[in-house]
Image (cartoon, helix red, strand yellow):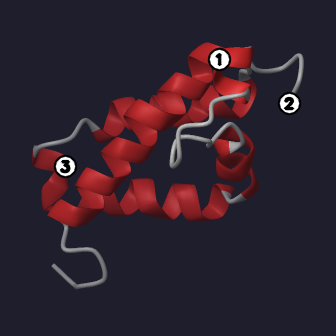
Amino acid sequence: MKGKLPDAVRLNTVRGRQSCDIVLRLRRFGDEMEAALDEVARGPAAEFVDADRMREAWLRLQREDGVHIYQVAITMLMRGLMAGLFLNGFGTRY
């Protein structure tokens, strides 16, 4: 990732925060991302999280690179999906 991520991110040694490849991993599992976003948008979580904004972030993540999109992936997509799936009762029918 040298030259693609700033050294502050690339060389981060804080355990649990070394997700410099999160954008690449999300792109690799695009079908699963689409399914998760659809699940959040269709369930009760849609009342509490902005599923449309998360979808826009996902579309941007597919075509942009750089530090900013990395931050979007971590903050908006991953945290939003975790909260949304939790509120929907992940793994249960609603």
Looking at the picture, which amino acid does disc 1 mark?
Ala
Q: Residue at x 25, y 54 (%)?
A: 84
Viewport quadrant of the C terminus = bottom left
Secondary structure of residue under mark 2? loop
Looking at the picture, which amino acid does disc 3 mark?
Ala
Q: Residue at x 89, y 16 (%)?
A: 3
Q: Position of residue 19 (x, y in %)?
A: 62, 43
Q: Which mark is residue 8?
A: 1
Q: Which mark is residue 78?
A: none
Q: Quadrant of residue 78?
A: top left
Q: Position of residue 63 (x, y in %)?
A: 73, 26
Label 2 vs label 3: CA separation? 35 Å
Q: Considering only order in the chain, which callout, 1 or 3, is on the residue closer to the N terminus?
A: 1
Report whether residue 69 is seen.
yes
Residue carrying label 3? 46
Q: Quadrant of residue 1?
A: top right
Q: Residue at x 89, y 23 (%)?
A: 2
Looking at the picture, which amino acid does disc 2 mark?
Met
Describe residue 20's horizontal placement relative to residue 88 as left or right: right
Residue carrying label 2? 1
Report whether residue 41 is seen.
no
The crowding category of the residue bearing disc 2, from other C-alpha atoms within 10 Å (few below 14, some 14 to 19, many at least 20), is: few
